Image: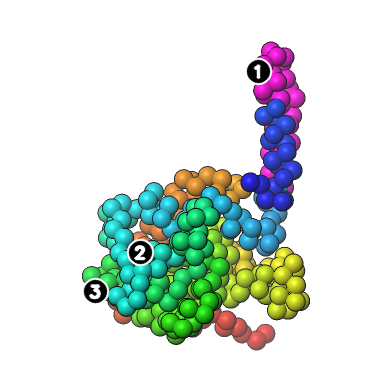
């Protein structure tokens, strides 16, 4: 389904498709008309996708068909072995993780997991983890340190689950614990924001040596809708909030919140998931190579310096 700002593109694509079908069934030569429309379509795509607003990028980050953590693990990694449970309460399907190989390199991986359809989204709570999900993530951080394997995390959540049941089991406390545990890793840690990076639910598994972000992903202390509801008492002001929050990949690069942007196919990762996953794989391999030579203490200090520098400024 096309997003609102993509509808002119969709309509033009349909016109081209109809003309091709007419030419096929009637034998009339319509190549010149089709070629003109295709040129117009290319210009329209460049104008649309080359000038996306912050809110439009938020919409692309939520688009159905966008690669999930399990999609990336299936296509970019080998021999993924999923581990379940937090050894305290339950297994949270909103966070997946385990052991895998990345081009022969043994790694530990953790990531938020959204559903591919309504039924699976309900099972995975729309990618919003309960406390047991973060406890599972911390168990895998311990595993990475124990065996000396790089730790990779994939972020795609509107935020941690805010329900009563989660609060009863210590949601805020466990997020703080996860932030603390990940900051103390003695192995290379890389976080990649796949789609949505909402609040502490994202930060809990994003305290890495290098934080990467997909071109159309977003990362912020609050979602645009929630911000708009607080500031203007109207969630419909989300586009205005998205601009003010500086949550796009470009903004975050300029602010130093993320270290690199992973390019997406034209129109978003959901248009060509395989190409997007290949770009993710290449970015992870390149970043891992940069961190390989650092000692455990150097990795710890590198992470410490990175996060201490956030928000730093100098007066003119």
**Badge 2 density bin: few <14, some 14–19, many ≥20, Cα 10 Å:** many
Image: magenta residue range: 19-47
Label drawn at residue 97 = 2
Q: Nearer the viewer, residue 4 or 287?
A: 4
The residue drawn where x is 49% and y is 82% is 167
Q: Nearer the viewer, residue 172 or 286?
A: 172
Label drawn at residue 24 = 1
User: Where's residue 182, x and y in %?
Assistant: 38, 77
The residue drawn where x is 46% and y is 45% is 274
User: Where's residue 292, x and y in %?
Assistant: 32, 66
For discs 3 and 2, the disc positioned in front in the rendered view: 2
Label drawn at residue 104 = none
Residue 305: name its quadrant: bottom left
Q: Does residue 252 appear anywhere in the picture?
A: yes
User: Where's residue 251, x and y in %?
Assistant: 62, 67
Q: Nearer the viewer, residue 112 or 152?
A: 112
Cα–Cα gap, marks 2 and 1 = 50 Å
Choose the circle earlier in sequence order: 1 or 3: 1
């Amino acid at each position: 389904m096309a997003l609102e700002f993509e509808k002119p593109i969709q309509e033009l694509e349909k016109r081209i498709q109809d003309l091709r079908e007419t030419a096929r069934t009637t034998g009339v030569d319509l190549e010149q008309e089709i070629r003109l429309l295709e040129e117009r379509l290319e210009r329209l795509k460049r104008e649309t996708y080359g000038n996306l607003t912050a809110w439009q990028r938020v919409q692309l980050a939520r688009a159905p068909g966008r690669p999930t953590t399990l999609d990336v693990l299936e296509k970019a990694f080998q021999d993924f072995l999923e581990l379940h449970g937090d050894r305290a309460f339950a297994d949270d399907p909103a966070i997946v993780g385990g052991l895998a190989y990345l081009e022969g390199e043994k790694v530990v991986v953790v990531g938020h997991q959204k559903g591919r359809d309504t039924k699976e989204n309900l099972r995975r709570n729309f990618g919003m983890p309960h406390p047991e999900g973060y406890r599972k993530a911390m168990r895998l951080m311990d595993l990475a340190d124990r065996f000396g394997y790089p730790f990779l995390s994939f972020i795609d959540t509107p935020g941690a689950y805010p329900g009563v049941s989660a609060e009863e089991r210590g949601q805020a406390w466990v997020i703080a614990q996860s932030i603390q545990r990940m900051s103390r890793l003695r192995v290379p840690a890389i976080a990649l924001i796949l789609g949505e990076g909402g609040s502490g639910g994202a930060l809990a598994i994003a305290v890495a040596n290098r934080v990467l972000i997909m071109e159309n992903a977003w990362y912020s202390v609050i979602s645009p809708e929630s911000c708009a509801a607080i500031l203007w008492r109207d969630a419909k002001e989300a586009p205005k909030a998205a601009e003010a929050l500086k949550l796009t990949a470009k903004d975050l690069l300029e602010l130093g919140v993320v270290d690199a942007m992973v390019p997406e196919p034209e129109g978003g990762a959901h248009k060509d998931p395989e190409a997007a996953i290949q770009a993710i794989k290449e970015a992870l391999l390149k970043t891992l190579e940069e961190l390989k030579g650092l000692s455990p203490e150097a990795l710890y200090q590198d992470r410490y310096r990175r996060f201490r520098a956030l928000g730093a400024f100098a007066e003119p």
